[in-house]
Structures are given as structure tokens and as C-alpha cells.
Amino acid sequence: MKTYSCDDYDPNSLSVEEALRSIDRDLQPIRGEEQLAIRNALGRVLAEDVLSKINVPPHDNSAMDGYALRGADLPTEGKTQLTLVGSSLAGQPCTETIQAGQSARIFTGAVMPTGADTVIMQEHVEKQGDTITIGAEHKPGQHVRPAGEDITIGQVVLKAGKRLQPADIGLFASLGIPEVKVFRRLRVAFLSTGNELCALGEMLQPGQIYDSNRYTLHGMLTRLGVDFVDMGVVRDTPIDVENAFLSAASCSDAIITSGGVSVGDADYVTDTLCRLGKANFWKVAMKPGKPLTFGKIQEAVFFGLPGNPVSVMVTFYQFVQPALRRMMGQNKATPARFTVPCLSPLKKTPGRMEFQRGILEYDEQGHLVVRSTGKQGSGILRSMSHANCFIILPRDCGNVAAGSEVLVEPFDGLV
Ligand code: AMP
Ligand code: MG
């Protein structure tokens, strides 16, 4: 076992990777699918592979404005003359069949006339009346986009597990597909625990704070595209916590709580979960967000997040979001992470993986660099608001000197 000169290393704690693997092992995609009009399917997850019923493009067509002809008519040397017998415009194909010695005017995207297999750009043609003259510098088959070049009939265009983006909706439309089968929406219940929490609109009494976690959770779940039930604030008594958990389990696929998971006197989350279902209580070697409860009540998956506002967000993005995506049927995505120089010195004690908050920007030379948002306390929600990325510092690393390379995970795409 490794030893550290500091006391932040806890031999009973789980690494972030172990916690992620353990959660992943316990989850399956939800059952239940629905057929939706493609416009309503944005952000939903495909429940089956989508095959193309047509070729894209559907016909051989011209890549240029010019003249369509038979490649066999191209001169190998000198020049040749061809007779114009028709024209092919987008949406108005040529009705003539192109015979030897003939050609047709054609425009970009227009269907190749029967018999023609080659297009000469208009700039390379001399035209006089119904006769065109072409030289020897062309190749048979040039400037033609063959039918099925993009997609062929029967080809899988998108696989089950794809979360649908605007481009996907357009792709379905381009294939003439009006509806697709997607997973039903995931139902998530969430609540805050804590006797100190005050509702918005009420005056703060001594010792009270406003409940912010339910608002960040509401935002994060909205972005994720789930159906949710806001169960409000639950008082720190065993009976209130139990009633809230049972009612959440009866209406959801997943439950998310904040607060009450440390080992303080008023922390009933894990105890209640143990009584009602199955519980794992983990000390995850991460900062912020050390205590984390993961389990199940009846059919609902349970995530007990710590109470501190930044811990809620970090544990949500690192554990809950990938887990919910898996339950939504989505394929696993590798988080976008890369290294950049860090302009600020960073304080770090070895023993826990840290998710510090950073601002990623271009310096005057146009290089991408990151700097710290400043104070990194797990209660400082402003740090998340000002940040546009996590700076991820590995478990074993200590203080980081200014100018060192650090790993960052941009919020764009993550949040
Ligand atoms: P706990 O884990 O319940 O001891 O909470 C840890 C810290 O987070 C305490 O300082 C709480 O007051 C604070 N906290 C807990 N829940 C919330 C919430 N919903 N909104 C804002 N802060 C909270
Ligand atoms: Mg509490």
C-alpha cells in the first residue's frame, strides 16, 4: 500500500474509477419504447437500428454545371464535337437517351440522362448553337455522383443507443423516415434533506440557508432530458426521510437526494436506504464529493449525493449523469478531456482525485490555457458558475506549479 506524508489518504476509500465501474455493473437500460415523429425525438435515445430504405443520392447526378455525355465519346487526342439533344435541371430530368456523338446540358444535382456517364464542366467546353467542342483532357466517369454514394439501401444509418441530435433528425428526413422508435423518458425523483433549508420566498431565520441543490438538480436533469418529480425539502427525521423515499420509489426509475449522507447525527439517508432496500455507502477518494450513497429501493436506483452545493454538481456530472444515460439506453461516451498549461498554481494534497473549477481560454499567443476560478471550497457554488471546465488532478498528485500541464474536462458537452 502506498503511504503519504499527509492524512488525506483514506485506505477505506474507493477510487473514482472503482465507484464508476461498480455503479455501471448494477445498471441496465429501462424497458419501454415509443414511436415518435422525428421532430419530437430530439434528445431522445434510439431504441433500434435505423436502416435506409433508399439510396442517397437516389440517382446518379452531376457534381458540376456542364454537359453530360458518354465517356466513350471522349477524344484521346485532339478535339471532338457532340450534338446537344436536351437538358437536365434539378427536379426536371432530361427525357432523351444520350447516344454516341450526343450530349445534354446539365446542372449541379440534376439526374444524369440515360446513356450518359460523364460530365464536362461548362468552362471546358466551346459551344456554338447545338454543337459543343471538347478537348482530350477529360476522364470517363468524371464529375458524376453515383446513386448510393452517401448511403445505400439497407445500410444502418444510426445505431440503437444514439442520442438524437439536430443532424440526426435531418438525416431521417433526408431518408424519408417520418417516425423512429426511442426509449421512453426516464423518470427521476429528487429531493433535498436538511432542517436548515429555507424555501425561496421566505425570510432566512438564524441558522438557515436557502435550498440551492434542488435548483441545480432541476437544471441538470432538464438538460439531460428526463421527466422529473421535485419532491421538495425533507426534514432530518427518520420518518420524514422514510416516507419521502417510499413515495419517490413509487413514481420513479431513479431517485437523487442531497445532504444527509455523511456520518453526522442527523444523517438518515444511508440508514433509511439500508432499511428500505439495498445500500452501498462509499467514501470516494475525490474532492469535492467524498461521501456517496448508491443503492436501490424497490425498482428505483438511488443516488445519495453529499449536501455541499459544489459536491452535488461534481458527483452528479461524474457519477449520476453517466448512470442515468446508461439507464436511458444511451451508448457509453468517453468524456472529452485533454491537457493544457495551467496559469495558476493549484493547492492539492495527495490522496483524492480533485475536480477543481477552471476557466479555459486563449492566451495572447492564441494558445489554449486554463486558470483557476480561485477558492475551491465545496460550498462555493460561484466557482461552478464562473468556471467553464473541471481541472482534474489525479489522486496521487500534490501541489501544481503555475505553468504545469493539467487535465481539463470542458463543461460544453458535459453540462
Ligand atoms: P450535509 O451533508 O447534509 O451535512 O450537508 C453538507 C453541507 O451542505 C451543509 O453545510 C449543508 O447546510 C449544505 N447543504 C445541504 N443541503 C443543501 C441544499 N439543499 N442547498 C444548499 N446547501 C445545502
Ligand atoms: Mg444535512
Image (cartoon, helix red, strand yellow):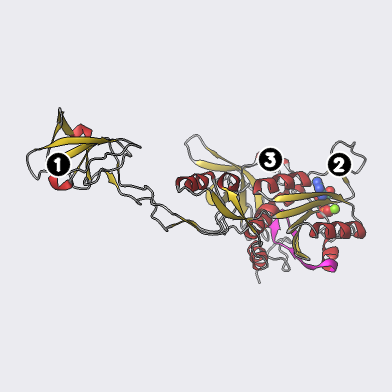
Closest to the observer, 94 or 25: 94
Q: Nearer the viewer, mark 1 or mark 2?
A: 1
**Residue 273: quadrant of the picture:** bottom right
**Residue 402: quadrant of the picture:** top right
Q: Which structural element holds mark 3?
A: helix
Q: Position of residue 210 (x, y in %)?
A: 84, 42
What residue is shown with label 3? 385
Q: Amino acid at mark 3?
A: Ser
- Give the mark nearest the N terminus, 1 or 2: 1
Q: Residues within 10 Å of mark 2 (few under 14, many from 20)?
A: some
Q: Amino acid at mark 1?
A: Glu
- Give the mark nearest the N terminus, 2 or 3: 2
Q: Which structural element holds mark 1?
A: loop
Q: Is residue 336 left or right of residue 372?
A: left
- The verdict on label 1 being within 8 Å of ligand 1 is no
Q: Nearer the viewer, mark 1 or mark 3?
A: 1
Location of residue 131 with respect to 388 vertically, above or below: above
What residue is shown with label 1? 137
Is there any visible trace of residue 400 in the rendered image? no
Mark seen at residue 34: none
Q: Which structural element holds mark 2?
A: loop
Location of residue 301 with respect to 164 vertically, above or below: below
Residue under the image location 45 percent in, 45 percent down: 174
**Residue 153: quadrant of the picture:** bottom left
Mark seen at residue 199: 2
Is residue 285 within the magenta segment?
yes
Is residue 3 within the magenta segment?
no
Single out the residue that lies furthest toward the front: 95
Q: Residues within 10 Å of mark 3 (few under 14, many from 20)?
A: few
Q: Amino acid at mark 2?
A: Ala
The magenta stretch spans which residues? Answer: 275-291
